[in-house]
């Protein structure tokens, strides 16, 4: 199976801009007792997950660092609500993106954190092609214009990982207490085929914030004339 790294096509000339954030979030970790780091991840988001059944919902409304014991307590409150295969890390976000939008949008657009947005009609075309694992989630964004498109956020599950051969041989393991990674993303990626599911055409790496699709997804977008994305092939071992 051939895989591709997805990025936004900034040469397409679209002016669309979204200023929005997910409704709820886990806190970051403050002063891990082992590695002493204060940190938060930037990639895991589950816009389909509704946290309203959780008690003390206000604990999930403000981005902040907390002691690791408090982070772990809040993490376990939301775990039962996650889709199968979902992972959690400090700073994971949930629920619809809330905010404002304006401008002209192509079939796809992306945020700087990797949130992948799609126009409803484009998603329906891809689903009609039989592509697997495409979940479009509503966004609570208000447009400052008429004839605004209906944008959905695609929920990208963290599933695949990089192959150890593209990482430094003398790399430090993640912190055994908080899980903070201690290796920067390599410039040249190599995917580990053993870690990729066979039933998803769109996903996010579990160990680094990189959006990945299969050749089935890339071919369908090009054949259907869906714009807004670039596809860069990435080797697999």
Image: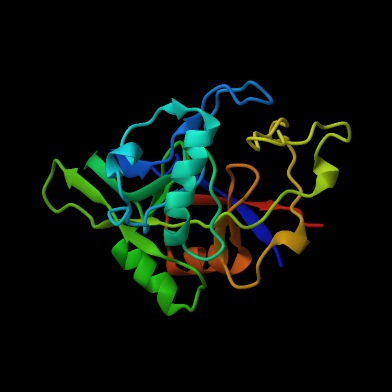
Above or below: residue 187 compared with residue 229: above
Question: Residue 60: x percent and y percent?
Answer: 35, 40
| Quadrant location, the N terminus | bottom right
Above or below: residue 129 compared with residue 107: below
The number of numbered discs placed on residues in the rendered structure image is 0
Residue 103 appears in which quarter of the rendering? top left
Judge whether residue 50 can be spotted in this image.
yes
At horizontal 36% and vertical 59% (from top left) the residue drawn is 48
| Quadrant location, the C terminus | bottom right
At horizontal 27% and vertical 54% (from top left) the residue drawn is 52
At horizontal 78% and vertical 36% (from top left) the residue drawn is 173
Classify residue 11 as left or right of residue 16. Answer: right
Above or below: residue 181 compared with residue 134: above
Question: Residue 66: x percent and y percent?
Answer: 46, 28
Foreground pick, 111 / 34: 34
Q: Residue furthest toward the right?
A: 169
Question: Residue 51: x percent and y percent?
Answer: 33, 53
Above or below: residue 182 compared with residue 205: above
Classify residue 81 as left or right of residue 197. Answer: left
Judge whether residue 114 can be spotted in this image.
no
Question: Residue 187: x percent and y percent?
Answer: 72, 35
């Amino acid at each position: 199976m051939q895989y591709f790294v997805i990025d936004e096509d900034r040469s397409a000339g679209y002016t669309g801009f979204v200023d929005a954030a997910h409704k709820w979030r886990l806190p970051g970790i403050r002063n891990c007792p082992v590695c002493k780091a204060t940190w938060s991840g930037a990639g895991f988001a589950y816009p389909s997950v509704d946290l309203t059944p959780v008690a003390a919902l206000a604990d999930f409304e403000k981005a902040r660092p907390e002691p690791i014991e408090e982070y772990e307590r809040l993490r376990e409150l939301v775990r039962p609500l996650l889709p199968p295969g979902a992972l959690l890390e400090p700073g994971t976000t949930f629920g619809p993106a809330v905010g404002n939008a304006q401008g002209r949008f192509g079939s796809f657009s992306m945020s700087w954190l990797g949130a992948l947005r799609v126009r409803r009609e484009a998603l329906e075309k891809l689903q009609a092609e039989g592509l697997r694992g495409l979940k479009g989630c509503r966004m609570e964004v208000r447009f400052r214009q008429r004839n605004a498109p209906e944008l959905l956020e695609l929920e990208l599950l963290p599933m695949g990982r990089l192959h150890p051969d593209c990482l430094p041989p003398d790399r430090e393991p993640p912190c055994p207490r908080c899980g903070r990674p201690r290796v920067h993303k390599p410039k040249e990626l190599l995917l580990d085929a053993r870690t990729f599911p066979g039933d998803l055409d769109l996903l996010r790496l579990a160990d680094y914030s990189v959006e990945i699709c299969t050749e089935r997804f890339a071919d369908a977008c090009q054949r259907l004339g869906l714009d807004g994305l670039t596809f860069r092939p990435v080797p697999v071992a």
